[in-house]
């Protein structure tokens, strides 16, 4: 069985690039995850939990409930990306979050830890948005 372990911290910053620079300078090269983020936050909006968003989440929920039983990491990423995508809206001609995340996974630019952190952050932000 494929096992996923979440082992991370959350960092929030009004200036992510300055934070990444500071982390790189102090801790030595840890800004790779920020530099290679698969979603451009300027081109994706976080949706509030409206009826349509809730319905999209309900479609994904059975897959999330059984995610620990999934042995294929590509399927795990696809499920997590679908859950994230349900709460995000691309702006202008930006690709969907699902497309960006799956591409980043296939290109080895995204880890399961990053994806889990992103899901948590998007959930927190989406729940706090007024509808």
Image (cartoon, rainbow, N blue to C red):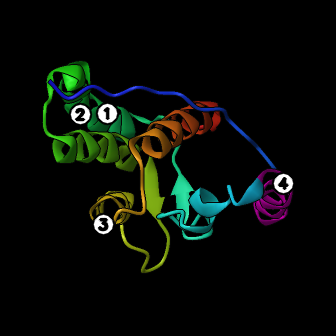
Disc 4 marks which residue? 14
Name the residue: 28% across, 45% down. Answer: 77
Q: CA distance from mark 4 to mark 2?
A: 31 Å
Quick one: label 1 or label 3, which is nearer the N terminus? 1
- Disc 4 is placed on an element classified as loop
Quarter the N terminus occupies: top left
Locate residue 111, reporting x and y percent: 42, 49
Disc 2 marks which residue? 60
Circle 2 or circle 3, nearest the eye: 3
Q: CA distance from mark 2 to mark 1?
A: 5 Å
Identify the mark at residue 110; answer none if there is no mark.
none
Q: Nearer the viewer, residue 27 or 73?
A: 27
Magenta-drawn stretch contains 20: yes
- Disc 2 is placed on an element classified as helix
Please tell me whether residue 6 is drawn above or below residue 38 in the rendered image. above
Disc 3 marks which residue? 103
Circle 4 or circle 1, nearest the eye: 4
The 10 Å Cα crowd at callout 2, few under 14, some 14 to 19, many 20 or more, is some
Quick one: label 2 or label 3, which is nearer the N terminus? 2
- Disc 1 is placed on an element classified as helix
Q: CA distance from mark 3 to mark 4?
A: 27 Å
| Corner quadrant of residue 101 | bottom left
Kindly check if marks 2 and 1 are in contact, taking CB atoms under 8 A apart as contact.
yes
Disc 1 marks which residue? 57
The 10 Å Cα crowd at callout 3, few under 14, some 14 to 19, many 20 or more, is some
The 10 Å Cα crowd at callout 1, few under 14, some 14 to 19, many 20 or more, is some
The 10 Å Cα crowd at callout 4, few under 14, some 14 to 19, many 20 or more, is few
Residue extent of the magenta highlight: 14-27
Quick one: label 3 or label 4, which is nearer the N terminus? 4
Instruction: Tell me the chief SS of the magenta region.
Output: helix
Q: Nearer the viewer, residue 88 or 10?
A: 10
Quick one: label 4 or label 2, which is nearer the N terminus? 4
């Amino acid at each position: 069985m494929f096992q996923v372990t979440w082992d991370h911290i959350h960092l929030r910053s009004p200036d992510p690039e300055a934070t990444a620079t500071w982390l790189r300078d102090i801790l030595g090269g840890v800004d790779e995850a920020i530099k290679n983020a698969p979603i451009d936050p300027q081109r994706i909006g976080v949706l509030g939990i409206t009826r349509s968003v809730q319905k999209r989440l309900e479609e994904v929920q059975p897959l999330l409930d059984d995610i620990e039983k999934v042995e294929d990491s590509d399927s795990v990423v696809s499920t997590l990306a679908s859950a994230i995508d349900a709460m995000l809206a691309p702006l202008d001609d930006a690709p969907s979050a699902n497309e960006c995340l799956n591409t980043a996974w296939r290109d080895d630019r995204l880890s399961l830890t990053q994806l889990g952190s992103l899901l948590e952050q998007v959930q927190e932000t989406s729940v706090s948005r007024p509808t």
